[in-house]
Image (cartoon, rainbow, N blue to C red):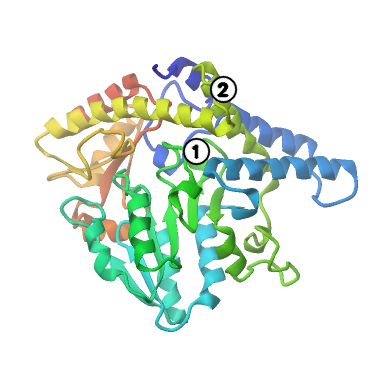
């Protein structure tokens, strides 16, 4: 069964007829239902939550329903799901909450591959006595080698933070195997995974992954500009509250939501679920649970995205001056359709502007993974060119990208 693209694209009024959007890893177009939910809230529910009057109660139900959808997307409970302004803020808040639980000599492992949101806050635990170890990137393959993790693990390992999908190269990391190796060494180690670049392409199941924290950016999953962070209940209860002093330590997840959630944005979140429901129904899915339908929708997304990636990779593989950074395969079991490359003799900053003239939206730079770009020796190229696709992109759009690149790289 193929994804009905005409049906899918009708849900995204923000998709331009003039622009082919290949910057989706930075933020995807929201669904119409998300936008409608936000507008409805702003127009009808401009009141405070928690009051006794009915309008306040209605507003609160909409906000809470949005938080429930965020949790459902992760396969978690609402009590274990922190909805905040961004993944950067959510992970920084979690790090502050765990800092008082760090003892001198505790070891923290971070990678060179991650977005800085999942590196900087954990490196900051050194100020609380932690010893920071670095899981180095494999320079040849631009990924993390599991064999390089083993020597870093010890009885003092307190926390390991790594990515589920590298936001600069799109390769999946085998989270289940990483977790297995860590748990075998020390079962009580905290495992924090950045799933921001993974979640737009595959349905997340945090319970199956057996991680302690998992972060996603909802504005990259066709929603509003919010982040969602799963924190295992035991760890959330253990963490020091970051809200006002009168919030009790058992206020879950509010203890890690200083200032609360943006009401109107949370009210838009059910639109993500409504969209996934519609895709599942359109393609004849009758699962026993809602998430089963979503899982089928994501399988259709993955199959289509593999075709998109293959067409672009075919062009890049054949071009004599192009070097693909990361896997050169389109295999959907190995990667997302987030594709990075550099051009010999041409800075990345010069590759992209000619594409603008063709209304093809691509970006260049380090994409907040500056440590990875430095480790891979790509600073001299001014970073990478990154073309990031999602399921609503078309093969015709990829052909436009290939044609524009062909002209730019002459």
In the image, is 111 to the left or to the right of 81? left
Count of numbered labels shown in the rendering: 2
State the residue position of label 2.
278
Q: Is residue 382 visible?
A: yes
Residue drawn at the location 42% of the way across and 43% of the way down: 26
Viewer-closest of 14 and 134: 134
In the image, is 353 to the left or to the right of 222? left
For the view shown, which residue lies furthest in the left direction? Answer: 320
Q: Nearer the viewer, mark 2 or mark 1?
A: 2
Viewer-closest of 385 and 357: 385
Q: Is residue 59 above or below residue 390?
A: below
Callout 2: SS:
helix
Dot 2, how many residues are within 10 Å of its Cα: few (below 14), some (14-19), or many (20+)? some
Residue drawn at the location 34% of the way across and 23% of the way down: 397
Q: CA–CA distance between discs 2 and 1?
A: 15 Å
Q: Quarter-wise, where is residue 337 in the image?
A: top left
Callout 1: SS:
loop
Where does the image place residue 233, in percent across and percent down from the top left? 59, 59
Q: Is residue 114 visible?
A: no
State the residue position of label 1.
221
Residue drawn at the location 42% of the way across and 66% of the way down: 187
Q: Quadrant of the C terminus?
A: top left
In the image, is 297 to the left or to the right of 321? right
Where does the image place residue 280, in percent across and percent down from the top left? 52, 23
Viewer-closest of 366 and 285: 285
Where does the image place residue 162, in percent across and percent down from the top left? 37, 58
Dot 1, how many residues are within 10 Å of its Cα: few (below 14), some (14-19), or many (20+)? many
Q: Quarter-wise, where is residue 178 in the image?
A: bottom left
Viewer-closest of 94 and 236: 236
Q: Earlier in the sequence, mark 2 or mark 1?
A: 1
Q: Is residue 178 above or below residue 344?
A: below
Q: Quarter-wise, where is residue 199 in the image?
A: top left
């Amino acid at each position: 069964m193929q994804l009905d693209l005409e049906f899918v694209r009708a849900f995204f009024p923000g998709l331009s007829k003039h622009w082919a959007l290949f910057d989706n890893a930075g933020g995807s177009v929201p669904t119409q239902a998300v936008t409608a939910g936000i507008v409805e809230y702003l127009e009808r529910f401009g009141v405070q939550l928690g009051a006794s009057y009915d309008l306040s109660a209605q507003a609160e139900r909409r906000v809470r329903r949005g938080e429930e959808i965020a949790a459902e997307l992760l396969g978690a409970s609402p009590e274990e799901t922190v909805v905040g302004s961004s993944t950067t803020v959510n992970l920084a808040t979690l790090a502050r909450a765990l800092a008082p639980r760090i003892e001198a000599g505790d070891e923290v492992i971070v990678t060179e591959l991650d977005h800085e949101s999942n590196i900087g806050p954990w490196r900051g635990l050194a100020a609380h006595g932690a010893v920071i170890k670095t899981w180095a990137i494999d320079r040849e393959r631009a990924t993390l080698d599991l064999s390089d993790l083993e020597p870093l693990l010890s009885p003092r390992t307190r926390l390991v933070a790594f990515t589920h999908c590298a936001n600069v190269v799109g390769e999946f990391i085998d989270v289940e195997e990483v977790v297995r190796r860590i748990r075998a060494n020390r079962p009580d180690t905290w495992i924090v995974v950045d799933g921001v670049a993974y979640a737009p392409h595959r349905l997340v199941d945090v319970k199956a992954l057996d991680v302690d924290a998992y972060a996603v950016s909802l504005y990259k999953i066709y929603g509003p500009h919010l982040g969602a962070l799963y924190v295992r209940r035991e760890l959330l209860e253990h963490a020091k509250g970051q809200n006002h002093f009168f919030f009790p330590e058992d206020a879950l997840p509010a203890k890690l939501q200083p200032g609360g959630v943006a009401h109107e944005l949370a009210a838009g979140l059910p639109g993500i679920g409504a969209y996934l429901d519609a895709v599942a129904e359109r393609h004849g899915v009758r699962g026993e649970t809602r998430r089963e339908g979503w899982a089928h929708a994501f399988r259709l997304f993955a199959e289509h995205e593999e075709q998109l990636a293959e067409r672009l990779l075919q062009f890049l593989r054949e071009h004599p001056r192009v070097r693909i950074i990361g896997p050169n395969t389109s295999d959907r079991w190995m990667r997302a359709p987030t594709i990075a490359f550099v051009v010999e003799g041409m800075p990345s900053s010069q590759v992209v502007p000619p594409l603008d003239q063709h209304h093809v939206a691509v970006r260049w730079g380090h994409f907040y993974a500056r440590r990875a770009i430095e480790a891979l020796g790509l600073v001299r190229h001014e970073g990478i060119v990154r073309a990031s696709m999602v399921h609503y992109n078309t093969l015709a759009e990829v052909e436009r990208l290939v044609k524009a690149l062909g002209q730019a790289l002459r």
